[in-house]
Each structure stands twice: as C-alpha cells, then as structure tokens.
C-alpha cells in the first residue's frame, strides 16, 4: 500500500510539473542556450587554467569556450534543479495538503517529492550532457556526470529550503543568481587561479566543480572531493526533508 501511495503521489507531482511551462522550458532549452551559446560567443584564445594533480596545483592552457563549457554544464543543472525545488515547495503545497488530508502519511508525500526532484535533475543532466558532448568530451565522462548530479541535487535541496522562506518572485531571483555566482565566479579557476579563498570552499558548488575539472582534464578523482560532495548533499537533503515534513504537518 505504501509503495502504491508513493507512486500515486509521484504521478500527481509529475503532472503538476508538466503543467509548469516555465520549468519545462528551463529543462529543455536552458542547456542549449547556455552551453551552446558560450561556445559560439566566447573568444577562442587559450588561457591559463589551474587544476589539481596528485595534490599539486598545476597550470595548463585551454581554450576559453572549453573551460566555460565545463563550468556551464554543472551550473545549468544546479540552476534548473534549484528552481524546480523552489517551485516544488511552493506550488505543491495545495496538492500535498490534499494528499495528507485523504490519509497519506507525511513520509510518503516527502519520498515522492524527493524522487521527483531526482527525476527532474536527471532530465536536465541528460539534456545538458547531450549538448556538451557536441563541444567537449571529458576524460572521465562518468565522473563528470556525478559532478552534474551532485551539483543539481544539492541545489535542488537548497531550492526547497529557499521556497520554504521566500515567495515565488524572491525564490526565483535567489535560485537564478546563487548558482551563477557560486559556480561561474567563485568556483571559476580562471579567477581563483587554483587557490580560492577559504570561505569559497564552503559553497555548494565547490566540490562538484573540483570533480568536474578533474574529470575533464585528469585521469583521477580525489576521493576527498567526492566524500565531501556527498556529505554536503546529505546535509542539504536532511534539511530539505525537515522542511517538507514541517509543511505536511501543517495540513495534518
């Protein structure tokens, strides 16, 4: 019975998201716009890039469009998933309340919403990956996908938290600018030169971007980066679950 209820709640959530034309447009078209456009407008000059190899920071030269492709791809996943999480917390309140009123347990509703957020993240990952592969093939594609997934899910959970405290307009602005500032500015190795300020390492995009650049330009991934990225995702998931639980309790 519980599995059936979770599935039903998931289907309700899918139908609700499909009616959100803004979100569907972001999933389908934003990766094309950001990733493809940067490859056509960015100068083709090679510029220095600092990456870690065996714990040492070394400088390599790569074309600017290629570097921005590495940055843009996880950023798009984070941006879309973050907005999806924000919408899910706000616009799903009415449907979630109805499910609770007809006898659904709060954990059944919460599970369906977390699964739905994961599916949306996977959808934008697939779209972004297809577009990226026209311009760049990372050395370790599988690990690059992991970086995209962790970035997307982490910001998706942050979107849930933002949606619980801000209105739709404020939440949209927050989830538009936060991933851009984090990933395109504070995690940009062309700006940080491989030596970011200590506070930048606490931002959601730090460890996913470390994995992304390692997966693109090296043949190995730092286990510590993966561990901290998963831990960060776990912490935000717990907080998002608590936010969902608080919302569903209001209707009980």
Image: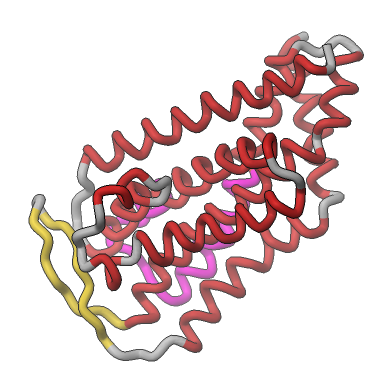
Tell whether position 234 is magenta: no
Residue in the picture at 64% in, 26% down = 243
Q: Nearer the viewer, residue 6 or 191?
A: 191
Q: Is residue 44 left or right of residue 247?
A: left
Above or below: residue 181 compared with residue 17: below
| Image x and y of residue 38, in percent | 49, 80
Q: Nearer the viewer, residue 34 or 14?
A: 34
Q: Is residue 214 left or right of residue 18?
A: left
Tell whether position 127 is magenta: yes
Residue in the picture at 91% in, 13% down = 102
Residue in the picture at 83% in, 33% down = 12
Image quadrant where one finds the C terminus: top right
Q: Is residue 182 left or right of residue 52?
A: right
Image quadrant where one finds the N terminus: top right
Q: Nearer the viewer, residue 53 or 193?
A: 193
Q: Is residue 50 left or right of residue 82?
A: left
| Image x and y of residue 158, in percent | 56, 40
Above or below: residue 78 compared with residue 97: below
Image quadrant in which you'd find residue 70 = bottom left
Magenta residues, start to end: 120-146
| Image x and y of residue 63, in percent | 30, 82
| Image x and y of residue 92, in percent | 80, 35
């Amino acid at each position: 019975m519980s599995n059936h209820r979770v599935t039903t709640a998931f289907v309700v959530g899918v139908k609700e998201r499909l009616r959100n034309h803004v979100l569907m447009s972001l999933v389908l078209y934003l990766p094309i716009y950001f990733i493809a456009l940067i490859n056509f407008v960015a100068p083709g000059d090679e510029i220095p890039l600092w990456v870690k190899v065996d714990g040492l920071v070394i400088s390599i030269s790569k074309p600017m469009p290629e570097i921005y492709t590495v940055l843009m791809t996880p950023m798009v996943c984070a941006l879309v998933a973050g907005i999806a999480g924000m919408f899910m917390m706000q616009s799903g309140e009415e449907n979630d309340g109805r499910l609770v009123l007809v006898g659904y347990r709060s954990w059944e509703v919460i599970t369906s919403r977390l699964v739905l957020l994961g599916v949306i993240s996977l959808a934008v990952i697939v779209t972004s990956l297809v577009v990226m592969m026209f311009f760049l093939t990372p050395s370790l594609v599988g690990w690059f996908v992991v970086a995209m997934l962790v970035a997307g899910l982490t910001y998706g959970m942050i979107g849930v938290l933002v949606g619980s405290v801000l209105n739709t307009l404020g939440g949209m602005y927050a989830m538009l600018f936060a991933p851009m500032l984090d990933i395109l500015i504070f995690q940009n190795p062309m700006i940080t030169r491989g030596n970011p300020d200590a506070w930048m390492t606490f931002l959601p995009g730090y460890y996913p971007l470390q994995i992304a650049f390692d997966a693109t330009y090296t043949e190995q991934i730092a286990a510590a980066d993966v561990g901290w990225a998963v831990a960060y995702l776990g912490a935000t998931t717990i907080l998002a679950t608590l936010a969902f639980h608080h919302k569903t309790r209001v209707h009980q």
